Image (cartoon, rainbow, N blue to C red):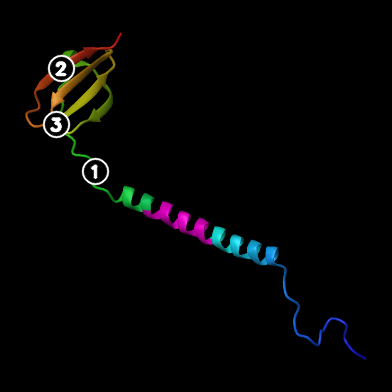
Protein backbone atom coordinates (compact mmCIF):
# COMPACT_ATOMS: atom_id res chain seq x y z
CA UNK A 1 0.00 0.00 0.00
CA UNK A 2 1.41 3.34 -1.08
CA UNK A 3 1.35 6.48 1.12
CA UNK A 4 -0.62 9.18 -0.77
CA UNK A 5 1.38 11.99 0.84
CA UNK A 6 4.69 10.92 -0.72
CA UNK A 7 5.15 11.94 -4.32
CA UNK A 8 7.53 10.01 -6.53
CA UNK A 9 8.68 13.29 -8.11
CA UNK A 10 9.99 14.61 -4.73
CA UNK A 11 8.65 17.29 -2.41
CA UNK A 12 6.09 19.71 -3.80
CA UNK A 13 7.24 23.20 -4.72
CA UNK A 14 5.86 25.97 -2.54
CA UNK A 15 4.04 28.83 -4.26
CA UNK A 16 6.06 31.95 -5.07
CA UNK A 17 3.87 34.20 -2.91
CA UNK A 18 4.43 31.94 0.11
CA UNK A 19 8.20 32.09 -0.45
CA UNK A 20 7.97 35.90 -0.68
CA UNK A 21 5.96 36.12 2.56
CA UNK A 22 8.45 33.90 4.41
CA UNK A 23 11.34 36.12 3.30
CA UNK A 24 9.39 39.25 4.17
CA UNK A 25 8.67 37.99 7.70
CA UNK A 26 12.35 37.09 8.13
CA UNK A 27 13.48 40.56 7.01
CA UNK A 28 10.93 42.28 9.24
CA UNK A 29 11.98 40.16 12.22
CA UNK A 30 15.64 41.01 11.66
CA UNK A 31 14.75 44.71 11.34
CA UNK A 32 12.80 44.66 14.61
CA UNK A 33 15.61 42.87 16.44
CA UNK A 34 18.11 45.42 15.08
CA UNK A 35 15.85 48.29 16.17
CA UNK A 36 15.49 46.96 19.71
CA UNK A 37 19.27 46.47 19.97
CA UNK A 38 19.82 50.03 18.69
CA UNK A 39 17.40 51.48 21.25
CA UNK A 40 19.11 49.57 24.07
CA UNK A 41 22.54 50.81 22.92
CA UNK A 42 21.31 54.41 22.77
CA UNK A 43 19.80 54.18 26.27
CA UNK A 44 23.02 52.73 27.67
CA UNK A 45 25.08 55.45 25.97
CA UNK A 46 22.78 58.16 27.32
CA UNK A 47 22.96 56.89 30.91
CA UNK A 48 26.75 56.53 30.71
CA UNK A 49 27.18 60.14 29.54
CA UNK A 50 28.97 62.42 32.01
CA UNK A 51 26.69 64.53 34.19
CA UNK A 52 26.25 68.20 33.27
CA UNK A 53 28.78 70.68 34.63
CA UNK A 54 26.77 72.36 37.40
CA UNK A 55 27.98 75.29 39.51
CA UNK A 56 28.86 74.56 43.15
CA UNK A 57 26.67 77.33 44.58
CA UNK A 58 24.17 79.80 43.19
CA UNK A 59 23.09 82.85 45.18
CA UNK A 60 19.62 83.88 44.10
CA UNK A 61 18.51 87.51 44.49
CA UNK A 62 16.02 88.37 47.23
CA UNK A 63 16.13 84.95 48.88
CA UNK A 64 14.08 83.37 46.09
CA UNK A 65 13.83 79.61 45.77
CA UNK A 66 14.86 77.77 42.62
CA UNK A 67 12.16 75.91 40.70
CA UNK A 68 14.01 74.99 37.52
CA UNK A 69 17.54 75.02 36.13
CA UNK A 70 18.80 75.03 32.54
CA UNK A 71 22.11 75.75 30.86
CA UNK A 72 23.62 76.85 27.60
CA UNK A 73 27.19 76.75 26.29
CA UNK A 74 28.38 79.80 28.29
CA UNK A 75 25.50 80.52 30.69
CA UNK A 76 23.05 78.90 33.06
CA UNK A 77 19.60 80.06 34.11
CA UNK A 78 17.44 79.52 37.17
CA UNK A 79 13.67 79.96 37.25
CA UNK A 80 12.62 81.19 40.68
CA UNK A 81 9.38 80.96 42.63
CA UNK A 82 9.17 84.77 42.44
CA UNK A 83 8.37 84.56 38.72
CA UNK A 84 11.80 85.57 37.43
CA UNK A 85 14.45 83.92 35.33
CA UNK A 86 17.99 84.81 36.37
CA UNK A 87 20.78 84.13 33.90
CA UNK A 88 24.39 83.80 35.08
CA UNK A 89 27.69 83.66 33.22
CA UNK A 90 29.12 80.14 33.41
CA UNK A 91 32.78 81.21 33.69
CA UNK A 92 32.53 84.11 36.15
CA UNK A 93 29.27 83.25 37.92
CA UNK A 94 28.13 86.88 37.56
CA UNK A 95 24.50 87.77 36.98
CA UNK A 96 24.00 88.57 33.29
CA UNK A 97 20.27 89.16 33.00
CA UNK A 98 17.05 89.01 34.96
CA UNK A 99 13.77 88.36 33.14
CA UNK A 100 10.40 88.85 34.80
CA UNK A 101 7.79 86.35 33.69
CA UNK A 102 4.39 87.98 33.34
Q: CA distance from mark 1 to mark 2?
A: 25 Å
Q: Residue furthest bottom?
A: 1
Q: Earlier in the sequence, mark 2 or mark 3?
A: 3
Q: Nearer the viewer, residue 24 or 9?
A: 9
Label 3 CA crowd tier, 10 Å (few <14, some 14–19, many 20+):
few
The boundaries of the magenta stretch are 30-41
Which structural element holds mark 2?
strand
> What secondary structure is found at the residue carrying circle 1?
loop
Q: SS at mark 3?
A: loop
Question: Of residues 62 and 20, which is closer to you in this image?
Answer: 20
Foreground: 89 or 56?
89
- First in sequence: mark 3 or mark 1? 1
Which residue is found at the position 82% from the left and 84% from the top? 6
Residue highlighted by disc 3? 74
Work out which residue is located at the far top of the displayed protein and give it. Answer: 102
Q: CA distance from mark 2 to mark 3?
A: 13 Å
The residue that disc 1 covers is 51
Between circles 1 and 2, the one closer to the viewer is 2
Task: State the image coordinates of residue 67 (x, y, percent, origin top left).
Answer: 29, 23
Q: Is residue 27 magenta?
A: no
Give the number of callouts.
3
- The reply to whether dot 2 and dot 3 touch (C-beta < 8 Å) is no
Amino acid sequence: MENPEIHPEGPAQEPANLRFLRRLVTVLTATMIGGVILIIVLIVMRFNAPPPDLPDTIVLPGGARAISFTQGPDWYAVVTDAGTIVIYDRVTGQLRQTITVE
